[in-house]
Structure formats: structure tokens, C-alpha cells
Amino acid sequence: MKILRPHEVVSSIFQIDYERLLCSGKRAIIFDLDNTLGPRKSTQLEAQVFTLLGSLKGMGFHVGILTNRRNITNNLSINRLAEDYPLVHRASKPARGGFLFLLDKLDALPKEAVMVGDRIFTDIFGANRLGIYSIRICST
Ligand SMILES: [Mg+2]
């Protein structure tokens, strides 16, 4: 089914051609957390993740984080992320609420936004049905 099909598949967030996304009119990027920005349930994100997000900001992208993870307290790395970027946890993806909240925060229309995540039934389906360009992280 097309609604479950990502627009692109890449092996990591570092393999995405962000320049091309920018040129094609994208201005906001929403990242999933587990198995996207870091390993599942990770408490420590790699420094290069923060560097990448900073570069994206420098390119003019508005960046947000959308995760179904329930508990993000007592997690320094995630808290640091939430200081710099709008972050929604307990998002219950594919529910629309978190996506719409972040689109508003990031001042972007669905067609100007990109969702990057690893799961078909939450990240990709949730994005596709709202008209958000979807990129799947497939690391295996
Ligand atoms: Mg995930």
C-alpha cells in the first residue's frame, strides 16, 4: 500500500541529502528518536547527532523531535535535545496530534515538512497520511 511506503529509504540520518530537500522546498524536519537519532532507549546520543542537527539549523531548517517514548526525564542527552528543539514525547504515533503540533511549532505546512523515522506503521504512515514527505531509516 502506497500510504505505508516511504518516499526514501536510507541507512542513517547521516546519509540523507539535506541540501536536495532544502532545494525542493522543504523547511522543517521532524526526527523520530529511537533507532533514528540513536539506538532504542538510548540515554546518550552521539555528539555527531547534535552536530548534524546544528548544521541543519544553520542551513535554515526548523527541526523537531517526535517520539512515542514515554519517559524522557532523568535523561541528560534527551533533555539537552529538548532545550534546543521542540520535542514531543508520548506522541502515540501514528496519531496526528504530535505531527500537527510540531508543524505548527516549526511554522511549516505538511508539504514543506519531512519526517525521518524507522517504523512503517508509526513514522511513515503517520507522515504520509498528512502529506508529509517520509524518509525511513533502515539500518539492517
Ligand atoms: Mg523509532
Image (spheres, rainbow, N blue to C red):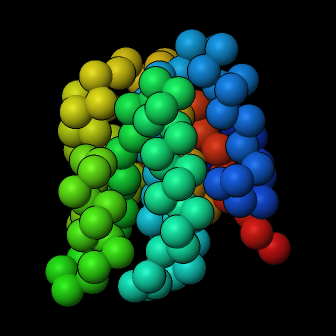
Name the residue rendered at 27%, 82% in the picture: 75
Work out whether residue 112 or residue 79 is closer to the camera in this orientation and state it. 79
Using the image, determine if residue 28 lies above or below residue 77: above
Q: Position of residue 101 (x, y in %)?
A: 22, 38
Q: How many marks?
A: 0
Work out whether residue 59 or residue 132 is closer to the camera in this orientation and state it. 59
Q: Is residue 23 left or right of residue 60?
A: right
Name the residue rendered at 53%, 41% in the picture: 55
State the residue lying farthest toward the right. Answer: 140
Quadrant where the C terminus lies?
Answer: bottom right
The answer to whether any part of residue 50 appears in the image is yes
Name the residue rendered at 22%, 33% in the picture: 105
Name the residue rendered at 36%, 45% in the picture: 64
Q: Position of residue 28 (x, y in %)?
A: 44, 30
Q: Position of residue 20 (x, y in %)?
A: 72, 23
* Image quadrant assignment for residue 92: bottom left
Using the image, determine if residue 39 lies above or below residue 112: below
